[in-house]
Each structure stands twice: as structure tokens, then as C-alpha cells.
Image: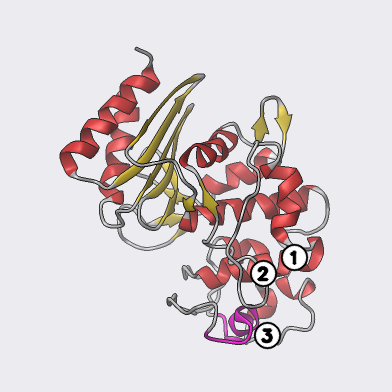
Amino acid sequence: MNRAQIVRDRIVERVTASGFDAHGLHVRIGTDGAEHRWTADIREDIHSVAKGVCVLAAGMAADEGAVSLDEPVSTYLPDFDLGSGVGEVTLRHLLTMTSGIDLPWSETLMTDWPDLAREFLRRPSRGRVFQYSNASTYTAMTALAARVGDVLDFLRPRLFTPLGIDDVTWERSPNGRIVAGSGLLLRTEELSRLGLLIRDRGAWHGRRLVAAEWIDAMHSDWVVAGEGAAYDRYALAGWAGPDPAWRLHGAHGQLLIFLDDAVVTITADDHFGADDIAAFVAATLTAS
């Protein structure tokens, strides 16, 4: 039995013992792979793991010279009204949740205002402080779309087609833009391909899809996000931990967990059990 199979079996045992409502599991360690399913492998919302895909989109656009993550967002949205201090906010600030703009999540976030991005940018900034908000990612992708056109159309030939992921759908706002921070539907196995691309620092079967610096920025230059052990540091869409790993983490247990040459992909419908299963995965990878 290879390492990936051993880790898979341990995770499956933990899921069974804990009652965690897992849907699918992929383990990749080096070139070894293993998987397990509890439900049919249908496309499901990967929730905030989609924020990592938005980072890939921004990185690809930067690689092509279409944007800079360190230019003010107002450069790309010159007709948007800006709140106090927002003139200094960059794409990087939006994608690291450090714009300092406060707009809490709600179930009706996309329909509460005529244009969520305009509402977000017209509010004041408190400076470079962490404020997690789906509106921040949505606004970043609104700015990106101003330079590259529809973000999903931009990503199809650059990301999804090379990964062999066809007919991708992404939830849209009433303005026709991708919801960005969630709403991207993928199968567990398709999500695992994104995980492998990220593990391999932007290379896919020898072809570079995105510069390694954008992958590295997902888990470096951490900003202080809070005091909870699982949510105390954030970067470009990535959360630090469970130590010594790092992860992309979507609501209800959508996880890409990275440690050295390993990436573990989990899809689930268990919001409150996700932190425990992530910690178990990190400990199992460390011990394997």
C-alpha cells in the first residue's frame, strides 16, 4: 500500500468514527494517488475555495500584463465612487481581505444593492486591517473583468481547459458578473486537479499555467486575521494551518489541504466538523 492509500484509509476511518458528513476524498502524495467516495461525484459549490481560483485568475492576468495586483483598484474602475481611504486599496488588498472596508456577509449579499462592487468601494476604509468579506473578492473580480472581460471566459482556455474541466458554471450576480467568492461548481475529482496545480506551483504536466509567485503568495506574507488557531493568518485566499499545513477552505467542509508534496481534497456538507477533520488530515500527513 502506498502513502496516499494509507492516508486515505486513515481519513476514511476518522470520517466514519466522527460522523463527519463527507462526500468525496482525494489524496495525492508525490505521484501516488488514492480516493474514496461517500456520495455520487456530482458538481457541487466549492464555496470559498473559489477565492483561490480568483487569485489564479488575477495572477494569470498579471502574468499577461493586463493588471498589477499592487495598482489601486480605482485604476481599473475609474467611474466608481470611492469612500474615504479607498483610493489606496489595491487588488492585492481585496484578495487578502485587507482593504479595511466593512461589508458583512448576508444570504442576500448579491441583491441588497444595485451593484455590490460599487457599494463596497463607496464605503470608507479603516486602513490595512483584516476584514473577511465575499464582497471583497467580488469587487476584485469586477476590477479584473474591466481589463480582461468576463472572468470565467478568461479562465476557460487558461485554466479549465488545460485541466480537462469542461462546461464549467459559476453563479452570477444580477449584474452578470461571477459571484467570485463562491458559486463555482466542481466535482471532487475536478477540485483535486486544481489542488495538484497549486501543489505544483502553477505547473500542469510540465506546462506552466500561472507564475509560481502567485501560488507562493497563497501561503506566505500572512496577515493577522484573528485569534482562533484555525483562522489567525490569511494570505492570497489561503489560511495558515492546521500547522504545519495550509489550506483553501470553503463553507460546509470544502477543503484543499497542502503539506510539502501532499494535497488532500475533501468535499462535504458539514460546516462545523470541517476544522476537526482538517486538523486530523494535517496530523496524519505529518505522521505519514
Read off the residue under disc 1. 145
Q: Are marks 1 and 2 in contact (CB under 8 Å)?
A: yes
Q: Distance between the residues labelled 2 and 3?
A: 20 Å
> What is the secondary structure assignment of the residue under circle 2?
loop
- Closer-to-camera residue (87/2): 2
Image quarter (top left, top right, bottom left or bottom right) of the C terminus:
top left
Q: Where is residue 147 in the image (x, y as percent from the top left)?
A: 81, 64
Q: Would you name the residue on which mark 2 appears? A: 177
The magenta stretch spans residue 139: no
Q: Give the range drawn in magenta.
A: 112-125
Q: What residue type is labelled 1?
A: Ala
Residue at far top of view: 1
Front-lying residue, 158 or 248: 158
Dot 3 or dot 1: first in sequence order is 3
Q: Where residue 153 sits in the image (x, y, percent)?
A: 74, 55
- Residue at mark 3: 82
Question: What residue is rendered at 65% in x and 72% in y?
Answer: 89
Residue at 31%, 20% in the rendered image: 6
Q: Choose the circle earlier in sequence order: 2 or 3.
A: 3
**Residue 63 location, x and y as percent?**
78, 47
Mark 1 or 2 closer to N-term? 1
Rendered view: 112 above or below 194: below
Nearest to viewer (mark 3 / mark 1): 1
Q: From the top left corner, tell me how far across and down residue 173 is, in percent.
A: 60, 73
Classify residue 237 as left or right of residue 140.
Answer: left
Q: Residues within 10 Å of mark 1 (few under 14, many from 20)?
A: many
The span from disc 1 to disc 2 (Cα, nearest Å) is: 8 Å
Query: What's the amino acid at mark 3?
Result: Leu
182 vs 283, nearest the viewer? 182
Residue 237 in view here = no
Mark 3 residue crowding within 10 angstroms, few (<14) / some (14–19) / many (20+): many
Residue 251 falls left or right of residue 147: left
